Amino acid sequence: MKYEIVDDITSDVMFRVYGKSFEELIENSGEALFSVVCDIDKVEEKEVLMIESDGEDEKELIHNWLSKLLTVIDTENMFFRKFKVLELDRNGKIKVRVECYGEEIRQELVLTVAKAVTYYRYSVDQVEDGWVASVVLDI
Amino acid sequence: MGAAVNSVALEVRKLKEKLKKINDFKWELPTSAREKMNVPGIVYGSEKILNDMENDTIGQLANVACLPGVVKNTIMLPDGHFGYGVPMGSCVATDEKEGIIAAGLCGFDINCGIRMIRTNLYESEVKEKIRELISTLFKNVPCGVGSKGKLVLTNDQLDEVLVRGARWAVENGYGVEEDLERNEENGCMEGADPSKVSDDAKKRGRPQLGTLGAGNHFLEVQTVDKIYDAKVAKVFGIEKEGQVVVMLHCGSRGFGHQVASDYLKIHEKAAKKYGIWLPDPQLVCAPVDSQEGQDYFKAMKCAVNYAFANRLVMTHWIRESFEQIFGKKWQEMDMQSIYGICHNICKLEEHEVDGKKMKLYVHRKGATRALPPGHELVPKVYREVGQPVLIAGSMGTASYILVGAEKASETFYSTCHGAGRAMSRTKAIRSFWGEDVRKGLEKKGIIAKSTHPKVLSEEAPDAYKDIDEVIRSVDGAGISRPVARMRPLGVAKG
């Protein structure tokens, strides 16, 4: 399983995301976020956008990465359905470059508006068989 | 891990039991309720509201009372519900020298608020043309996710909007002077500094000025259903039942969300830097007199001004839509502003606390300012009766105009903002099918137009708390009194 909606809090949504590697966690968390904001299965891979993010550690990186995705929805007017990590650089600050596949927003695909990635019950942990993250979006 | 979580849950459950009844509409959470509370918490609400209130929400009220420089008591209003760090529907005031300032205490949608305009039209004549009117409004006022507006600003123009707020709108032909007078802060907060705002926020803000957005934001054509106080209603421009008014509920869009997110990250580092103990990691903050604190205040004011301008630009297009449908100038239809309010904001205000005059950073998150009769900040035209308080109900249910009352001095002149959610948006989407919601509204005579059926599901009326009980509570507490109730004739939303 890549991700699951875990908990419904009155004005937020929480999901838990998994990955066998940290790169996979980055990719799957992007998908999880878009599964909340849009009908991700209907999003078509018409365009590719390269998005970069960084963080002092894995926890900060995932938060920055997901926050960046919310920003890009507005600045590029796009929804994405698939992500591929091109490069993960762990020299000093962790830096990542991700290929994001999607298309211009179609209103019929809209599910909800996410205002921000919160720190509520936020965690990113390395476990026995990979990684798991817990994220709450303010919607 | 499991045991630790369970004991926390138990602690929170016990908090609700520690509430002491002060009167039928006021309850106190004493400082003994949890460790390190600097001040008590006060919850406003009827017994019914209290019974329905989540335990975790009371816990949040206790947590925020632990922050440095919180003055008198933390406040939760009857529409309070679980939020980000602090309840949605709360007011927290901090000392101008010793206190903290926090993005989370003001909300992600900075200056989410309401603007209302009156008309001299009545229900029967508007109902005849309601479908065309809603279609025209839907066409003229851009809404939806990632919606590109009709105005795409240059960098310089955006900076002007951030500094001048609704005044920019008037100067560019999107409103008149009276619109500024009949607005909180006269439509502009002084001291906004665009250099404290990130490039990402500006990139999001440039194409979105004059757009409604989505979520719980909407544009409603309403009719006055009931007048509770005819004298005050008349002063506000509400003459008779059946009169048509328009309510616009919207905020600072992606611009404001970005400013809030940016400063939460900055305040996370600031809290560590200044050694501020946080009972909840989401209560990140900075001392009011620190660089990080004042930078946030200046950036927040930019978002406040953006939202003021946003709502006035859309007001202009609402007036134009009515002109197109009814063939008269908006001035002939007397479409003057009733008032404009904010319900997610932080302001430096002067208040009297235990007989002493103090300057306080008043954070209102899902709370509306409510000034009583005679207060110098109430526009001259309303000063004798008090400040209009605009309350949006959930879609398809009643909205209210209240007026600030004397006992609001207890709450730093703050009252509720709306009905408050009872059910999460994803749960509402699963439970209510948009088409059914639209048909349900139509059965009640309300025409709803949205970008997609799901948009109606998440805002289904049953997903919200009972607004009548919320209003009864603020009235019972003496904070604000009902003046008029409105019901929707038609709604446009993204």
Image (spheres, coloured by chain):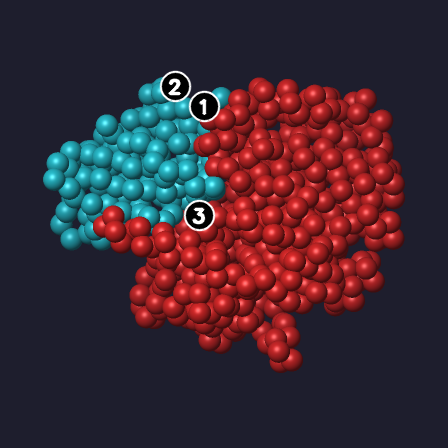
Chain colours: A cyan, B red
What x and y, as percent, mark residue B372?
74, 63
Labels 2, 3: front one: 2
Label 2 sits on residue: A42
Under mark 1, the amino acid is Leu
Q: Secondary structure at mark 2?
A: helix
Q: Is residue B185 visible?
A: no
Residue behind mark 1: A109
Q: Secondary structure at mark 1?
A: helix
Identity of the amino acid at label 3? Gln
Callouts 3 and 1 close, C-beta under 8 Å: no
Q: Residue at x 30, y 51 (%)?
A: B5
Q: Position of residue B124 (x, y in %)?
A: 85, 27
Left or right relative to B154: residue B234: right
Mark 1 is surrounded, within 10 Å at the Cα level, by few (under 14), some (14 to 19) or many (20 or more) other residues, namely some
Q: Chain of mark 2?
A: A
Residue B391 visible in this rendered orientation of the protein: yes
- Residue B197 position in % (x across, y down): 45, 54
State yes or no: discs 2 and 1 in contact (Cβ < 8 Å).
yes
- At a point 43% along the width and 41% down the height, the residue shown is A9
